Image (spheres, helix red, strand yellow):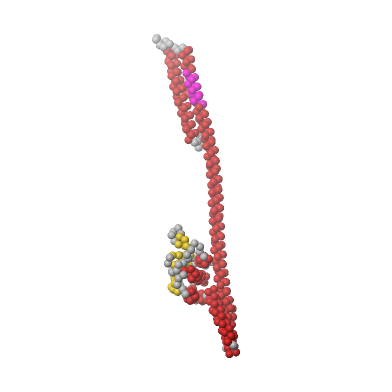
Amino acid sequence: MKSSHSGRSSQGSPRKAPKPPGVPRAGRDRRASANALVDRERAVVAREASALLREAALARHATALGVHGATAPPSSTEIGRLMDRMREANERLTIAAVRAQDLLDEANDEAAQAKRELDEVLSELRDANERLAAAATHAHTMAVEAGQREEKYRQLSSRLLTLQDDERRRLALDLHDSTAQQLAALLMNLDMVTSARKALDPRSWQALAESRSLAEECCREVRTLSYLLHPPLLDVTGLVSAVRWYAEGFSQRSGIDVALDLGEIGRLPQPIETALFRVVQESLTNVHRHASTTTATIRLTTTTDAIVLEIQDQGRGLQDLHIRDDGARAAATLGVGIQGMRERIRQFGGNIAVEFTDLGTTVRVWVPLNRELS
């Protein structure tokens, strides 16, 4: 009885398909619904079959014992009715199994579709990662190339500034040793002609006097130009003497009083002295052109590891200013002179800051000491 019931219950039960990986929620719901349906139909059929079998067993037992007053053995009609009920239950179980199989097939199809879509998404993600990696590599390569180009630009700027200083030094020597000497000889000849003024008429004497005055002026301008191109004091006595000499001459030429606060810094490497002197030249030139002031200050000091140069005026500074994000005022366009100063200082590992305020303009330069020059 028990084995027959077990065989009948397991006969119509379809074999469960293995659950594919990545089944979506809708597929899992369909699969659970199908399994629940099969289990319910199976339980109903099992209960009906068990009741029919018990009735048939009781009837056979009563007939065999011949018990008086026992229920009469079931007729063929009753047995047929029982068999019909069992067939109906089996059919319902079969239909439930088919429906469950259909639901499982749909769930498997959805799972397969979801897997294909997941594979497509993963493939797109892999492609996106590859493109991102390629873009990152390209960006890194561009950054390296940009750094290399910037380094080459700095080297070229440093080389150009060095060549410029060398050319200025050469022109200064040429003016001093050639043009200035020729003008000095011209003055001596004019002095010799002047000694014979008695032989000259008044008109010739006037022309001679004017010629000598022009020669003296040319000689002074050539000497001044030679010193401005490259002051001999910069090579002979150092930066402090050259700055003091230049400030005095600048005050005489421009009428701007320059106050000096020059510490005893001693001698510096010749490239650093030249760069700082050029910063002083350019800064005072900007004061004369743009500041509209009568005073300026130059401070030169040392710290334990650096040289600090500061040029300050009390004028209006550059008028073409804009307000930065941090609230500070800055020039909308920095001139070639300021860019040149920045390049000069950068080659020694220093920095330069230009500050514009309502009280004037301040140029601060910081150059490290004990740094190996390239």
In-image side of 12 versus 201 (left or right): left
Quarter holding the N terminus?
top left
Q: Residue at the location (55% across, 58% down)?
A: 146
Instruction: Let me know if residue 217 appears in the view.
Output: yes
Front-lying residue, 312 or 5? 312
Q: Which residue is farthest left?
A: 69
The percent position of residue 280, horizontal first and vertical second, equals: 49, 71
Q: From the viewer's perspective, is residue 332 above or below residue 165?
A: above
Front-lying residue, 328 or 53? 328
The stretch in magenta equals 85-98
In-image side of 170 versus 67 (left or right): right
In-image side of 350 versus 203 (left or right): left
Q: Residue at the location (43% across, 14% down)?
A: 59
Q: Which residue is farthest bottom?
A: 198
Front-lying residue, 280 or 72? 280
The dominant secondary structure in magenta is helix
* Membership of 92 in magenta stretch: yes
* Membership of 298 in magenta stretch: no
Instruction: Let me know if residue 370 appears in the view.
Output: no
Q: From the viewer's perspective, is residue 328 above or below residue 37?
A: below
The percent position of residue 360, horizontal first and vertical second, equals: 44, 67
Front-lying residue, 74 or 199? 199
